[in-house]
Amino acid sequence: MAVVAPAILASTPEEYEAQIGRLHGFVDRVHIDVTDGEFAQNLTIPETQVWWPKEWKADVHMMVARPSEHLSTIIQMNPNMVIFHAECQEDLVPIFKKLKAETLIKPAIALLRSTVPETCADAIREAEHVLIFSGNLGEMGGKASTMQLEKIRLVKEINSNVEIGWDGGANLSNVFNLTQSGVDVVNVGGAIALSPDPGHVYREMVNEINRKGAI
C-alpha cells in the first residue's frame, strides 16, 4: 500500500522545530531534506541538527556532493532510510553495501530528471528504494513532471523488488495518478507544508491514494 510522507525542509533549527510541530500528531513517516550548499544551491540545516519524534519513521534525503563525508553521522542517527543522489561525486555501491552489512538503514538512490536509470544500474541493484526526483533541489513547491513516471518501468527492469519514491510537485490533484503508476512513497512538500491546515491536506491525500477507481 502506498504512503504519503510529508517533507521537511528548513534552513534554521527554529524553522525545523516549527515544521516538526506542524506535523506532530498525524504522521508516522517523514522525508527530511538535507543539503550541503554545493550539490544543491540552497543550504538547509546540517544532518547533525536533524532529529525527529521517536515514534516516527524518518527518511533522510541527503542532497550532498560526497556522501562518504556524511555517512558516519547518518549511521549514528539511525534513520529508516538514507537517500543519496546518483549524480553525486562518489560511487554509491560500496556505501550501500556498508549500510546493508552494518546497519538496518535502508540505502536509497535518487535520480534527477535528466538521469537515465541504466547509467546507475549497479547502485540501483544495491538499493532498497529509488526516488524519482521531479522537483528542484533544495526547494518546495515545484511541478510534477509525469513524464518521469516512465522511469519506474526502467528501474524495475534493473531491480524488480525496489521500493519507488516520488519527490516533486505531489498534491491532491495528482497523488492518485502517481500511486496508480507505481509510486510506493509519495513525498509531499509544499502542498502540506504551506497549507494552513496540514493535517487536513495529509488526510485528504491519504484518502485519495486509497480510493478505488481507474486513473
Image (cartoon, rainbow, N blue to C red):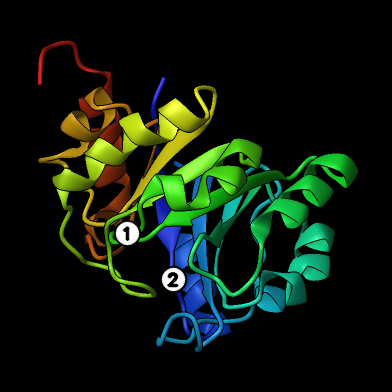
- The image shows residue 59, relative to residue 206, as above or below, that is below
- Left or right: where 164 falls relative to 100: left
Q: Residue at x 15, y 60 (%)?
A: 143
Residue in the foreground of this view, choosing between 206 and 181:
181
- Left or right: where 151 falls relative to 185: left
Whether tag 1 and tag 2 are in contact, CB under 8 A, the answer is yes
The mark found on residue 9 in the picture is 2
List the single residue furthest toward the top: 212
Residue 155 position in % (x across, y down): 42, 35
- Work out whether mark 1 precedes mark 2 in sequence or the reverse, and give the earlier one: 2
- The image shows residue 129, relative to residue 196, as above or below, that is above
Residue matched to label 1:
189
The mark found on residue 144 in the picture is none
Residue 100 position in % (x across, y down): 79, 41
Residue in the foreground of this view, choosing between 104 and 17:
104
Residue in the foreground of this view, choosing between 62 and 78:
62
Location of the C terminus (image quadrant): top left
- The image shows residue 43, relative to residue 89, as above or below, that is below
List the single residue furthest toward the front: 119
Task: Name the kind of residue labelled 2 in the image.
Answer: Leu
Q: Secondary structure at mark 1?
A: loop
